Amino acid sequence: MTQRIGDHSYPATHSGFIGRQAVVIGAGIAGLAAAGALADWFERVLVLERDSPADALVPRPGTPQAGHTHGLLVGGQCALEDLFPGIGEDLVRAGAVRMRINQDLREEFPDRAPMPQRDFGRIGYTMTRPLIETVLRRRVSQRANVTLHHDTRALSIVATANGQRVAAVRCVSAARTLTTDADCSETVPADLVVEASGRGHLTSALLRSIGRPLPEETTIGVDIGYTTAVMDIPHDAPPDWKLVLTHPNAPHSTRRAVMIPVEGNRWMLSVAGRGNERPPGEWSELLAYLRQLSTRTIYDAVRHARPTARLARFGFRESAWRHFERLEAFPDGLIPIGDAICRFNPIYGQGMTVAAKEASLLHRLLGACTSERDPLRGLGQLFLAEAKSLIETPWTMASIPDFAVPATRGERPADIEHSLRFGRALSRVAARDEAVQRLVVEVWHMLKPITAYQDPALVRLVEAEMMESTVG
Ligand SMILES: Cc1cc2nc3c(=O)[nH]c(=O)nc-3n(C[C@H](O)[C@H](O)[C@H](O)COP(=O)(O)OP(=O)(O)OC[C@H]3O[C@@H](n4cnc5c(N)ncnc54)[C@H](O)[C@@H]3O)c2cc1C
């Protein structure tokens, strides 16, 4: 017995919907958030995921990064709330830990006192990435018109004969590969296809198949190694912080660490470094590595702890931004989203937030085009143009400190030395000025764009600090 995926009969659209069937490729953070965005505007939304359903809060083969610390910034949390009202409370019920921003964060620097732990009246949540996905999957599954198809791999996106528009997704499901059909694949019609596969390969393959150019790509080579340990929080854990972030002593060292509380009263500790400073995979060696961080807070907190599972490791070569928005023409009915557009250096914790913000953007754009005669015409290009502005802030915030390391590959911005000095001075000003720290926190959490730093009064303050440090 084989099962057909989705709706092949294609009934007429009811009023209120702008399309009959939308297909999302990938049920990671971007795909699940996008499914929530589409459910209001399409009669039926199918989510195709190559992995089997996750039956526990553990990483899946399709998302090996999920065994590492995944911080959700407040901007991402707000975007998820737009799409799934009350999701913050769902996360807490599932075990996420509430965090007072920045009162519960100890942010440490190699050359000065930690950042003051001021309370800015905002709440964030920390948890493992599988927990975020589980809660999102539950919320998506509650939408009557959304169906998740696990064990189903999308093979290609199919365009109409003239190549102007997307028509379908060709996929293969585990159920069908067990059949004796010569061609086990199935073609699922779609008015809109969202590629949230984390890669963007299917969008590129479609562009190639219809004779269109591929997007230019900006890359920043960082070659980062990650090691993550999970352990029970000891009874004598320091009471004055819940989360620690230890910055590296750049440019001399790239060793950094972040430790967050996650569900089950556990700490998740991720350590990262580059080149010969890649963190080791054995606990005793990792402890020795932790002693060489620029401060001892994390080492002192965990030295008597034991990891509850094998340490997880990950290698990340380069950040990559595919500039689909620069293409002159883009097929209608196609939206790449999340890592399929831009993969960020993970140490800054931005990818999920950008994915959620893009899904929220998609929801808004779909809502704004309902009265158009052909609502999906030009939507992809509009989405990609607006997504570019979303991406610019996190990309810039990550690339500036990345280029502080001489071994970083990529095109260094001409004013990089000035940007690095400005960033360091801004951080020192923020330490003594609560209003400036609030702004820095809002930009970091993607609640405000990085252009907020161009405010003339702020620039004067920061430049005075830069002068003082030069003279000093
Ligand atoms: C080590 C590491 C740490 C990170 N830490 C953070 C962090 O702290 N904070 C943060 O915000 N982000 C972090 N990220 C980034 C984050 O994981 C992603 O940016 C974010 O999850 C968005 O990814 P996505 O949904 O676009 O893709 P993915 O998470 O990669 O999901 C893609 C999904 O598509 C499925 N798929 C792929 N191909 C197919 C196909 N052909 N057919 C069907 N299904 C398919 C995969 O199985 C997978 O489920 C980190 C990344 C790494 C590598």
Image (tube, rainbow, N blue to C red):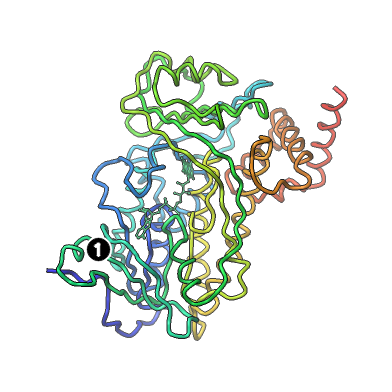
Quickly name the residue at label 1.
173
Residue at horizontal 69 percent and vertical 29 percent from the top: 431
Badge 1: how crowded within 10 Å, few (<14), some, or many (20+)?
many
Q: Nearer the viewer, residue 14 or 318?
A: 318
Q: In which quadrant is the N terminus drawn? A: bottom left
Residue type at mark 1 is Ser
Residue 29, placed above or below residue 303: below
At mark 1, the secondary structure is strand
Q: Position of residue 398 (x, y in %)?
A: 62, 43
Q: Position of residue 416 (x, y in %)?
A: 75, 42
Residue at horizontal 66 percent and vertical 51 percent from the top: 449
Q: Residue furthest front?
A: 182
Looking at the image, residue 336 sits to the left or right of residue 215; the answer is left
Q: Nearer the viewer, residue 79 or 11?
A: 11
Q: Position of residue 420 (x, y in %)?
A: 73, 37
Residue at horizontal 55 percent and vertical 27 percent from the top: 276
Looking at the image, residue 428 sits to the left or right of residue 114; the answer is right
Residue 239, placed above or below residue 199: above
Q: Residue furthest left?
A: 1
Q: Residue furthest right?
A: 471
